[in-house]
Image: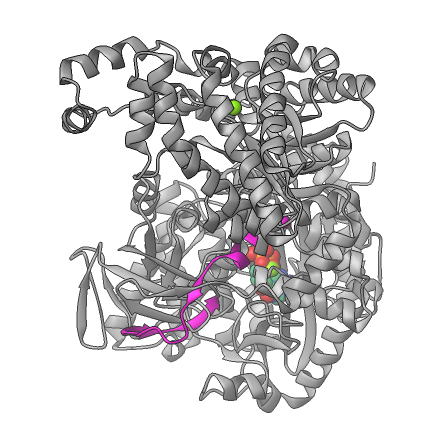
Amino acid sequence: EQWVYSFGGGTADGNTTMKNLLGGKGANLAEMARLGLPVPPGFTITTAVCTAYYENGETYPSDLTEQVNDALAAVEKETGKVFGDADNPLLVSVRSGARASMPGMMDTVLNLGLSEVTVKGLAAKAGERFAYDSYRRFIQMYCNVVLGLKHDTFEHILDDYKERQDYQLDTEMTAEDWKEIIVQYKAAVEKQLGRPFPDDPREQLWGAIGAVFGSWMNDRAILYRKLNDIPAEWGTAVNVQSMVFGNMGDTSATGVAFTRDPSTGEKVFYGEFLINAQGEDVVAGIRTPAPISHSRAEAIGSDEAPLEDAMPKVYEELVAVANKLESHYRDMQDIEFTVEDNKLYMLQTRNGKRTAAAALKIAVDMAEEGLISEEEAVLRLMPGQLDQLLHPTIAPDATRDLIVKGLPASPGAAVGKVVFDSDEAASLAEKGEDVILMRVETSPEDIHGMHAARAIVTARGGMTSHAAVVARGMGRPCVCGAGGLMIDPAAGTFRAGGREFKKGDVVTIDGAEGEVLAGAVEMVKPDLSGDFGKLMAWADKVRKLKVRTNAETPHDVDTAKNFGAEGIGLCRTEHMFFESDRIPVVRSMILAGDKKGREAALAKLLPMQRGDFAEIFRIMEDRPCTIRLLDPPLHEFLPHSEEEMAEVAQSAGVSVEALKRQADELHESNPMLGHRGCRLGITYPEIYEMQARAIFEAAVQVAKETGYSPIPEVMIPLVATRKELDILKEKVDATAKAVFQETGTTLEYMVGTMIELPRAALQAGVIAETAAFFSFGTNDLTQTTLGISRDDAARFLKAYEEQGIYEKDPFVTLDQVGVGELVKIAAERGRKTKPGIKLGICGEHGGDPASVAFCHRLGLDYVSCSPYRVPIARLAAAHAAL
Ligand code: ADP
Ligand code: MG
Ligand code: MG
């Protein structure tokens, strides 16, 4: 088996389609080499080795050494240098690279191959100071990444040394100083590890390779995979690549760039670089890098010379390479490059991470440029990302009390309480607090805190720092490099612009402007026209599923309509019962001892409900509206606290004791499976009759008033048997008939049922004889199929997910093989009885992309979800259809 794939010198064994085997970085290094771009030669050890390594008790395939030796020999030939050679040493980087990019998760070792012997060779060729500086960097990095020593071991040594020499900056260190430092470093390593720092380049190489494979299973990588749905089986590849040096003086540099702006999507060449530096210096945020292009430097008012001015020829070449890469990959590229003595080298390219806003703009622009098709554009935006575009930003005329300004690293706005620590951010967020994570800089150890936070602020680091990249990927607003920010975690304070704030103070983050503002600032609604409208129209062209909404208040119904809802899939009438003007009437209905009393109360409710429905029909015009009759157990409407009890008793004219007795009578030990749903209609038919009357009267009224023909779809909940539906449908039909007679107007309507009990799913063929439609109530269907109460699941579901019992929370993503199987059976049986029976889903799953795809495969007519998820469902439905 081929375990090792070479690249360089204009050719490569692999190519970009081989990401599974070579990882993203390796596959694209190969592709760039094939494209004839200047890629330092190297080789990729495949992900299959990683998998084999873990399958065989952390040992390598027996022929791996030989293949690595051969590939290394080829690199030596290509570069004219020799690994471990005293005169002309080849140095390499050892880089991890999984299929999906995992920024900062896996550590890279640079300058590998330096030893007591080879450092002299490097010094002779490239200068003493450079050689010894590289050597000490290598020792530091190798100890940290491979040998697991803490950074501060070395920091202390260096700081002490500089203090004694009275140096401020590393640049004041001479070759002799570095030599002394190296002696001290090595002594410290030997003291801590009980063995000397490895001086044999091959031992170093295998140590680093092992560390990359080992890092696949470190906690940070495991957490990142979990957050991003990356399976552990994928493994990582290892790239060994000949070094080029961006730290060889002022004619050398290193940088990162995007072919378009990853925050806004604007078509501008965008990036940052540092003169005389090595790769990760840019990302680490230790020095603040300069912009690449002139226009960008001007835009942000940078005093550093942009690459365009500092190295005009290199800049021109870089732009040409970037254009070539973008049109070759037909997507925005994120590239890493190094300049060694005025010569450009490409070290990485990948499809760039971007904010949702940028993803949208880039997709629409590229389709309009003719680079991709409209359908491809639709596929470029992930449904989950849309969420970010639908949420508010800061109102243009809001009063801004600026605390500090930094770089606009990731757009969006957020309000929350400031915390300085990632663990604290995570634990407060768990309690439902909105927090803003504020740090000097972030590292991969902060991932969980960043995820928990509403937004992130750092005092240091550029637009491509760890914080910026990760925040954009997560869709968190982020302000980076806020230089004026002084954070003192020990004192629990931060200072800026002469003001002091405390941990826990509320601030607003404006990621688009790079501003941290005091207090909670006013926000505005997002813009749904423009690019958003275009892309959604393309999505609508291809999708098969219709998208409705679950809503009942006029505000929500209106929001959903603006988001493109094509009807109401679930109007929960009981929500209207809770409004303050009607809850007393509802209570008097419940407390009434007999039918007569109930009817008197219902007569008062009728006009209120009619008004509600009329409002909904008016907004929805002639879109279909599924209205569910009363569903929850009645005791939910009764007061619970002592205070409320007293109040209600007084206004109802009964004693508190009588009220309590009544409440006790209604009490159920398992209300979810109790007196609710159609069981209420069976026992108190007058409730459903009133609701049906309100629906039909409202429909007729709106039809007369507007000329639209509302299409009420009356839905009976929690049906288990056909008989229940037969009895209740007859009552609804009779009510409709009566209303139509009284008003002289006849309207189309339907009576159908929710399928939310396993028995109903199995009996769907029979139930379809009566039902005109089914709506799958997958929340209850999940509860009743899994036998898990959603309200009680929190205590154990996490353990279930962690142990892989249910991969995903089944209340978020439909359990396709269990609950989904029942949906499938019911759909089939229902259709067999009544071809063309209308089928939809109205559980929480209606807005979950994976579940939407499942509904598409079953050929359901529509999904219904909460208003803010409507665009997500529309896009997910389009993805499913493509
Ligand atoms: P990550 O996956 O975290 O981006 P990389 O493997 O890309 O890590 O390495 C980090 C940095 O090290 C890169 O930005 C690159 O500039 C630098 N680097 C990696 N390999 C080399 C090399 N062969 N020569 C010079 N710099 C390198
Ligand atoms: Mg990289
Ligand atoms: Mg239900």
Q: Is residue 277 left or right of residue 862?
A: left
Q: Is residue 352 magenta?
A: no
The magenta segment: 383-410
**Residue at horizontal 66 percent and vertical 76 percent from the top:** 267
> Which one is in front, 761 or 691?
691
Q: Position of residue 86 (x, y in %)?
A: 63, 63
Residue 33 occupies which quadrant of the picture? Answer: bottom right
Q: Quadrant of residue 121?
A: bottom right
Q: Quadrant of ligand 1?
A: bottom right
Q: Is residue 340 left or right of residue 179?
A: right
**Residue 256 x %, y %:** 59, 70
Q: Is residue 69 left or right of residue 588?
A: right
Instruction: Inspect this view and state whether residue 277 appears.
Output: yes
Q: Is residue 401 magenta?
A: yes
Q: Residue at x 80, y 47 (%)?
A: 882
Task: Decide: is 39 above or below 881.
Answer: below
Against 178, is 192 above or below? Answer: above
**In this view, 548 is above or below 530:** above
Q: Position of residue 499 (x, y in %)?
A: 18, 72
The quarter of the picture where residue 715 lies is top right
| Image location of residue 511, percent across then percent down | 43, 67
277 vs 20, nearest the viewer:
20
**For this rendering, which residue is in front, 54 or 467?**
467
